[in-house]
């Protein structure tokens, strides 16, 4: 399940660091979080969709890796990011 273009641009606008920033860890984490939330809703209705479950677990793992990277390089940005996205730690 991919994000709509308008939704994707909105996320990029909220989390980018500069005018030309499209792929910083902050933006990637925000995009993954939005996709994870969409797929979580899908999984509530389709509990036996194992291929989607596998994709969801891969996205969660990738987001965790990116969050660990941000935490290692800038702990204050990490705390700000998880509070803005509503991710529990």
Image (tube, rainbow, N blue to C red):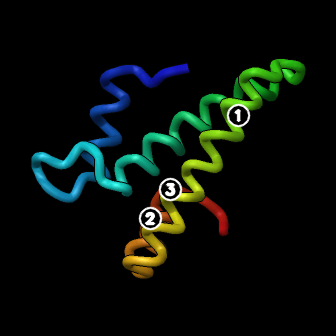
Give the secondary structure at mark 3. helix
Q: Is residue 72 above or below residue 70?
A: below
- Residue annotated with mark 1: 40
Q: Are discs 3 and 2 less than 8 Å apart at CB? A: yes
> Few, some or many C-alpha atoms within 10 Å of disc 2 (few <14, some 14-19, many ≥20)?
some
Task: List the residue tagged with mark 2.
Answer: 81
Furthest toward the left, the residue is: 19
Rendered residue at 64%/50% (across/down)? 61
Going 67% across and 30% down the picture, which residue do you hit? 55
Quick one: label 3, few (<14), some, or many (20+) residues within 10 Å?
few
* Residue 79 or residue 84, whichever sits in front: 79
Of callouts 2 and 1, the N-terminal one:
1
Residue at 48 percent of width and 74 percent of height: 71
Disc 1 element:
helix
Residue designated by label 3:
85
As displayed, is residue 13 above or below residue 73?
A: above
């Amino acid at each position: 399940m991919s994000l709509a273009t308008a939704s994707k641009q909105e996320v990029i606008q909220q989390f980018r660091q500069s005018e030309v920033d499209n792929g910083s860890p902050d933006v990637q984490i925000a995009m993954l979080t939005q996709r994870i939330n969409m797929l979580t809703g899908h999984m509530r209705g389709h509990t036996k969709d194992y291929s989607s479950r596998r994709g969801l677990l891969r996205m969660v793992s990738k987001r965790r890796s990116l969050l660990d990277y941000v935490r290692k390089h800038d702990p204050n940005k990490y705390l700000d990011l998880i509070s803005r996205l509503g991710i529990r730690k």
